[in-house]
Image (cartoon, grey):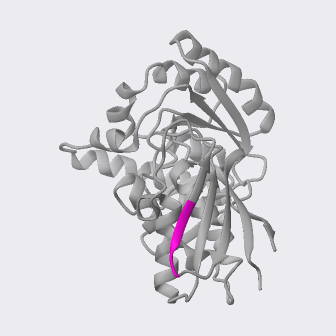
Amino acid sequence: MRQQASAFSPASVGNVGVGFDILGHVIEGVGDNVTVRRIDAPEVRITGIHGATVDLPLDAPGNTAGAALISLREALALPFGFEVEIGKGIPLGSGMGGSAASCVAALVAANALLDAPLTREQLYPHALVGEAVASGGKHGDNLGPMLLGGLVLSTADRLVRVPVPDHWHSVLVHPEAILETRRARAALQGAYELKEFVAQSANLALVLAGCHAGDAGLVREGLRDVLVEPRRAPLIVGFGAAKQAALDANAMGASISGAGPSVFAWFESRGEAEAAAPAVQAAFAAAGFDSQAWVSPINATGAELLSAT
């Protein structure tokens, strides 16, 4: 019987501009590591959190990883519990799926300790419970890609991986600033016009059709967020210049990653993405922010089990 397992979950780009709360893709090169130990006591304990720049809750029900594992335990009526240690590699309040990564990595590690492990799709409802602790709602735009890899459409109860050409890459630039998810969501309150929803639906359809067909022209036409970005952009100093820098470098489209303040852009090749990253960083530097950048295939690998003993 395995007693301990460790897993890694990559960061992600939530929303992908046109798919608010339902569309996302992973970013390789940065993520969270979680170690889970099987214990006799029928409970979940958070024993340590490393790498976080602010205090995160050690109380399991108030922690994304803890809440996800509590949900798993209760659903399966497990007679044993879990002890959890979290290593944060994703900046907090960055729009890179940090809260989601912790609960996904915890679930993947804990799943390896079960007598009858679940599928990634079966872990999804428990990940939603964990994500809700941080964001206040059950949305899977970060969770789906972390569980399956690549670009994923995540509804309330379904995960659908969307095919994307392997040569398409994304740039993610994170300015050294924090934008809390709850504050970013508060900016979305207010009235919307029907024509905005129609335009956003059309753009989402164009992006999904472009991905399935490998048609960059369709993606270029559709990767424009007319619903959420206009309301959140004022919260991100330097966003307009950063987005324009990506578009000037031949991006298929660019927008806010998750709740922000990070910015992502899609490119037709790795070379274009790598060439564009310094320009996007320079735009944030002109606004007074240092930044980090990652270039990743959109079809990058999702969460991985690192060890189980």
Residue 243, given in percent of the width and then of the height, sits at: 53, 26
- The reply, left or right, for residue 306 in relation to residue 256 is right
In magenta segment, residue 198: no
Residue 284, given in percent of the width and then of the height, sits at: 56, 18
Q: Is residue 201 visible?
A: no
Task: Locate the C terminus by quadrant.
Answer: bottom right
Q: Is residue 8 above or below residue 239?
A: below
Q: Residue at x 74, y 58 (%)?
A: 301
Q: Which residues are magenta?
A: 42-46
Residue 29, given in percent of the width and then of the height, sits at: 74, 44
Res. 48 image quadrant: bottom right
Q: Is residue 64 visible?
A: yes
- The reply, left or right, for residue 267 in relation to residue 58 is right
Q: Is residue 139 above or below residue 227?
A: below
Q: Nearer the viewer, residue 52 or 148?
A: 52
Residue 204, given in percent of the width and then of the height, sits at: 47, 52
Task: Locate the N terminus by quadrant.
Answer: bottom right
Q: Is residue 114 above or below residue 54?
A: below
Q: How many marks?
A: 0
